[in-house]
Amino acid sequence: MDEGKSQIHRIESGFEYDFIDKERIQEVHLELPSTAISVETHKAFVQKPYKHRKGLCVLKAFVILFIPFVTCGIYSLTGSPGAKSYFFNELMDKDPQTLNRHEKLVRLQTLFFRTPNDGKIADVLAISYFEEGLFQDAVNIYLDALRLNGETAPRLMGYGLALVGYEGGVITQEAQNAFQKAADLAPDDFYPRLFLADALCQAGKPEQAVQLLQNFLGTISKDVSGRSRVEKMIVQLRNTCN
C-alpha cells in the first residue's frame, strides 16, 4: 500500500487530465502496480461437504422457516405504503454544491438511472466511483462513457486505472490495451507510458520497459515538463525490476 501511494505521489504532479480531482487523488485507495512486488497466486477456497447429513437437513429446515420472518420484516420497512419516500426528491432539489460526497454520488446515480444515454453524466459518475475506490462500478460506467462519448486519452486512462484498481494493482492485458490507445491518442503525454512500462516490468521485461521510456524521451523536446519524471522512472525501473 505504501509503495502504491508513493507511486501516486511520483506521477500526480504530472497528471494533466480533468477526469480526476488533483486535490482528492490521495483519497483514492488505489494500490497502483509496484514494480518491486510480484503478484502471488491466490489459492482457490474449497468448501468441504458436510459430513453429517442430518445436520444439513436441520440447517435447511431452519432456513426455510426463517425466510418468511425476514421477508415480513423487510416489507414492513421498505414495502409499506406508509414508509417515507421523499428523500430522493429532496436530494434532487438541493443545490449540488451543498451536498456531501455521498449525497453527490447518490444524486449522480439517480440521474444516470433516469438518463442512461447522457454521456456527460456517465463521465462524471465514472470519476466519482473511481475517487471513492468503487473500481468495479467505475469500470462498468467507464465502458458506458466510452460507448456514449467515444475514445479519448483521458477517458481511456480512467478506464485503465479503474481496471488496475479492480485487479489490486495488476495491469491486465485489457488495462494495457487502454493505456496503449491513450498513448496513441496523446503522443506527447508521458503518463500512459509510465503504466505501459510498469506493465512490462510486471511481466518480467524490465529491459523493454526501460527501452520504451527511452524511446519516448527521444520523441519529445528537452524542455517538456514531464521529461524529468520519465528519467526518474527509468532509474527506478532499473533499480527495482532488477
Image (spheres, rainbow, N blue to C red):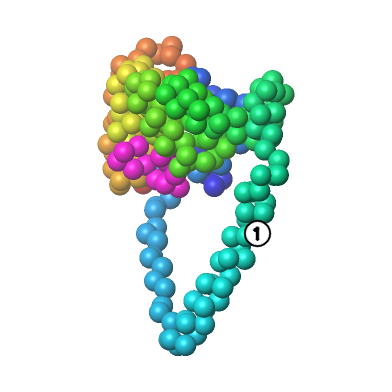
Q: Is residue 242 magenta?
A: no
Q: Residue at x 37, y 59 (%)?
A: 41
Q: Is residue 58 above or below residue 4?
A: below
Would you say 105 lies left or right of 56 here?
right
Residue range (magenta): 162-175
Residue at (70% x, 28% y) in the render: 90
Dot 1 alpha-carbon crowd within 10 angstroms: few under 14, some 14 to 19, many 20 or more: few
Residue 178 drawn at (x, y percent): 33, 31
Q: Quadrant of residue 84?
A: top right
**Residue drawn at x 64%, y 26% as measured from the top left:** 92
Which residue is found at the position 47% from the left and 25% from the top?
115
* Residue sitting farthest toward the front: 81
In this orientation, which residue lies closer to the viewer: 186 or 219? 186
Q: Is residue 76 above or below residue 69?
A: above
Residue type, mark 1 in image: Gly
Queried whether the magenta region covers residue 171, the answer comes back as yes
Image location (x, y in percent) of residue 144: 39, 30
Q: Secondary structure at mark 1?
A: helix
Is residue 109 depicted above or below 186 in this figure? below
Lateral position of residue 60 relative to residue 183, left or right: right
Instruction: Pick whichever, 25 or 228, lies toward us.
Output: 25
Using the image as rendered, state which of residue 13 and residue 93 is in the foreground.
93
Left or right of residue 51: residue 218: left
Mark yes or no: residue 85 visible: yes
Along the viewing direction, whichever of 20 and 123 lies nearer the viewer: 123
In this orientation, does residue 200 appear?
Answer: no
Query: Relative to residue 67, is residue 97 drawn left or right?
Result: right
Question: Where residue 133 sits in the image (x, y, percent)?
Answer: 54, 40
- Total of numbered circles in the picture? 1
Residue underneath mark 1: 73
Residue 138: % across, % down: 47, 36
